[in-house]
C-alpha cells in the first residue's frame, strides 16, 4: 500500500501555505541614533559613530548594485 509522504520527502518542492508581514516594535534605545531611509522602504539604524563607516559602505554597495541593474539610486 502506498504511504502518503510530504512533498519534500518525495523530492518535490513544497508549497507555501501562508505568508504574513508583521511589524514588531522594540523599546527605543536611549540616546541619539541616526536612521537612514532608502527608497524601497529599507531603513538602516546607525547605533553610534563606530557604525557610520559600515553603513556608508553598505549604501555605496546598494547604489552600485542598483546602477548595474539599470536603476538610478541617488
Image (spheres, rainbow, N blue to C red):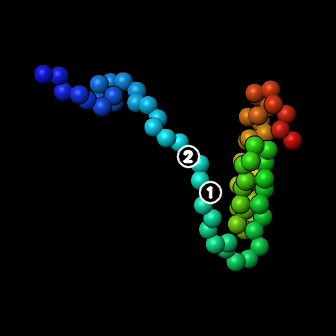
Q: Secondary structure at mark 1?
A: loop
Q: Which quadrant holds residue 49?
A: bottom right
Q: Are marks 2 and 1 in contact (CB under 8 Å)?
A: no
Q: Nearer the viewer, residue 7 or 48?
A: 7
Outermost residue, bottom side: 30
Residue 55 drawn at (x, y percent): 73, 54
Q: How many marks?
A: 2
How much space separates mark 2 and mark 1, taking CA atoms? 10 Å
Q: Which quadrant holds residue 1?
A: top left
Q: Residue at x 78, y 48 (%)?
A: 38
On screen, residue 40 above or below 49 = above
Q: Which quadrant holds residue 61?
A: top right
Q: Residue at x 45, y 37 (%)?
A: 17
Q: Residue at x 55, y 46 (%)?
A: 20
Whether residue 28 is visible to the viewer of this picture, yes or no, is: yes
Q: Secondary structure at mark 2?
A: loop
- Is 41 on the left or on the right of 73, as rendered? left
Q: Residue at x 83, y 38 (%)?
A: 73
How many residues crowd mark 1 within 10 Å: few (<14), some (14–19), many (20+)?
few
* Residue 23 circle label: 1
How many residues crowd mark 2 within 10 Å: few (<14), some (14–19), many (20+)?
few
* Residue 58 circle label: none
Residue 40 drawn at (x, y percent): 75, 43
Residue 2 drawn at (x, y percent): 17, 22
On screen, residue 4 above or below 23 = above
Whether residue 57 is visible to the viewer of this picture, yes or no, is: no
Quarter of the figure that contains the C terminus: top right
Outermost residue, left side: 1
Residue 28 drawn at (x, y percent): 67, 72
* Residue 20 circle label: 2
Amino acid at each position: 500500500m502506498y504511504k502518503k509522504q510530504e512533498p519534500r520527502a518525495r523530492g518535490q518542492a513544497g508549497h507555501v501555505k501562508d505568508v504574513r508581514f508583521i511589524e514588531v516594535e522594540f523599546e527605543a534605545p536611549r540616546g541619539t541614533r541616526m536612521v537612514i531611509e532608502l527608497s524601497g522602504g529599507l531603513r538602516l539604524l546607525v547605533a553610534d559613530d563606530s557604525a557610520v563607516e559600515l553603513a556608508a559602505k553598505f549604501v555605496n554597495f546598494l547604489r552600485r548594485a542598483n546602477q548595474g541593474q539599470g536603476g538610478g539610486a541617488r
